[in-house]
Amino acid sequence: MITITYGREIMKGILITILATLSWLIISISSLSCSAKMDSVVVAYAPFESTTLVWIAEEKGFLSRNGLDMVLRKYDTGAGALDGVLKGEADIGIGIAEFPLVGAVLHNQKFRVIGNVDEADFIYIVARKDRGIEKAGDLKGKRIGTTLGTVAQFHLGRFLNLNGLNIQDVNIVDIKTPEDWVNAVPNGDIDAIATAQPYAYRCKQLLGANAIYMPAQSSQPLYGVVVGAKTG
């Protein structure tokens, strides 16, 4: 059971957004052939807090009670979920941050942003003390992991800029898998990593007293949006 403390009205509003979005999609599919049986809606997501309310809606049966058959398709990142929508692997994506959306626009990808379901702050930098890192400025010249093309990459760059560095001052390593988000720093493969919760915290736990733990977003929230493929 997932327990999240939200204001009742805020949670109600977001759940209504999700239900309305899925209803719109099913109506659009059904309108193509009124005599055809309604298909399931495939929803792409990544397992971060920005999709929490979708899991709650599924667990509580809110969707099925409204005639919606939702099939969840898991991706490691929000950028991966967006890619799944663009490739036709899912009908909509939920909880996708704005940074990969901008990248898709710059590559002339077509999609629709339907709504927003979350405002979040969960990107952290975890580093090793024994590599001489005690504060943000000590990251200069270090090997820092992140997943390229994701919002974690954006916030790493912004964090460096706010602390008198830039992306050219460090050596960026593309870390692609959840297992490596947790283990690459404790294993000594890299000096630090910028990644999302809960993986950042797990990495910190493995490092123990050797961990430096810094919030990367500097009070700038990210937004988890609902995205659908643009077909016309």
Image: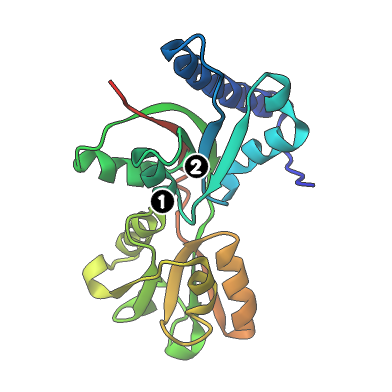
Q: Residue furthest bottom?
A: 130
Q: Tags 1 and 2 in contact by the CB under 8 Å rule?
A: yes
Q: Splitting the image into 4 quarters, where does residue 38 fall?
A: top right
Q: The residue under label 1 is which amino acid type?
A: Gly
Residue under the point 40% across and 44% down: 84
Query: Rounded to the nearest whole Å, what is the CA distance between mark 1 and mark 2?
Result: 9 Å
Q: The residue under label 2 is which amino acid type?
A: Ala
| Picture coordinates of residue 55, whole percent (x, y) | 67, 40
Mark linked to residue 44: 2
- Going from the N terminus, do you reach mark 1 or mark 2 first? 2
Q: Is residue 178 left or right of residue 161?
A: right
Label 2 Cα crowd, 10 Å radius (few <14 / some 14-19 / many 20+): many
Mark 1 highlights which residue?
80
Placement of 187 over or under 84, stated as above or below: below
Label 1 Cα crowd, 10 Å radius (few <14 / some 14-19 / many 20+): many
| Picture coordinates of residue 25, whole percent (x, y) | 48, 21
Toward the viewer: 45 or 39?
Answer: 39
| Picture coordinates of residue 32, whole percent (x, y) | 42, 13
Residue under the point 75% across and 46% down: 2
Residue under the point 68% across and 24% down: 12
Residue under the point 32% across and 60% down: 157
Placement of 32 over or under 194, stated as above or below: above
